[in-house]
């Protein structure tokens, strides 16, 4: 979407639909990869609690757990692309000064997300000790 283009309401909805479609496609591409890595992700998540074994009380609970872990890790892997799509959708509506603020603050979004995830992991890690 170019910065000089003027869209109607329907044009904006079409652009939003295409951004959402690209984001969903990215998640669907990352999902099988995440499913293959789900066992390793579960091992990393269970590492703070030594001797922990997962107990499944229903027949499909193990599959559901792997699917949830796969979906969450696919969302984490595709987060930079999803944020990029959101920024590219909003960018034409911003003034030059707002764009400068956005470009300055954008790296902090990824940094703060990573710091928050690591903080949550280590809170769990040190709480169990």
Image (cartoon, rainbow, N blue to C red):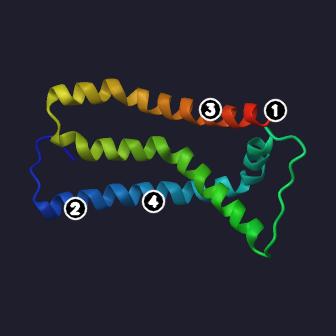
- Left or right, 77 with respect to 44, comes to left
Mark 1–mark 4 CB contact (< 8 Å): no
Q: Earlier in the sequence, mark 2 or mark 3?
A: 2
- Give the quarter of the image for residue 93: top left
Residue displayed at 69% across by 57% down:
35
- Farthest right residue? 51
Q: Where is residue 57 in the image (x, y as percent from the top left)?
A: 81, 71
Q: Where is residue 46 in the image (x, y as percent from the top left)?
A: 78, 45
Q: Which of marks 1 and 2 is nearer the N terminus?
A: 2
Mark 3–mark 4 CB contact (< 8 Å): no
Q: How crowded is mark 2: few (under 14 residues within 10 Å), some or many (20 or more)?
A: few
Comparing 110 with 18, the one in front is 110
Front disc: 3 or 4: 3
- CA gap between label 1 and label 4 equals 39 Å
- CA gap between label 3 and label 1 equals 17 Å
- Farthest bottom residue? 59
**Tag 4 residue:** 24
**Tag 3 residue:** 118
Residue displayed at 86% across by 48% down:
52
Indicate which disc residue 97 carries: none
Indicate which disc residue 129 carries: 1
- CA gap between label 2 and label 3 equals 36 Å
Q: Earlier in the sequence, mark 4 or mark 2?
A: 2
């Amino acid at each position: 979407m170019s910065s000089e283009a003027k869209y109607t309401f329907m044009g904006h909805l079409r652009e939003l639909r295409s951004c959402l479609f690209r984001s969903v496609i990215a998640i669907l591409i990352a999902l099988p990869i995440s499913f293959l890595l789900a066992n390793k992700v579960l091992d990393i998540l269970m590492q703070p609690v030594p001797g922990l074994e997962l107990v499944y009380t229903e027949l499909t609970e193990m599959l559901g757990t792997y699917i949830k872990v796969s979906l969450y890790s696919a969302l984490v892997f595709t987060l930079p692309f999803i944020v990029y799509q959101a920024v590219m959708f909003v960018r034409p509506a911003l003034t030059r000064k707002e764009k400068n603020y956005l470009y300055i603050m954008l790296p902090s979004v990824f940094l703060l997300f990573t710091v928050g995830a690591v903080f949550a992991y280590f809170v769990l890690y040190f709480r169990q000790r």
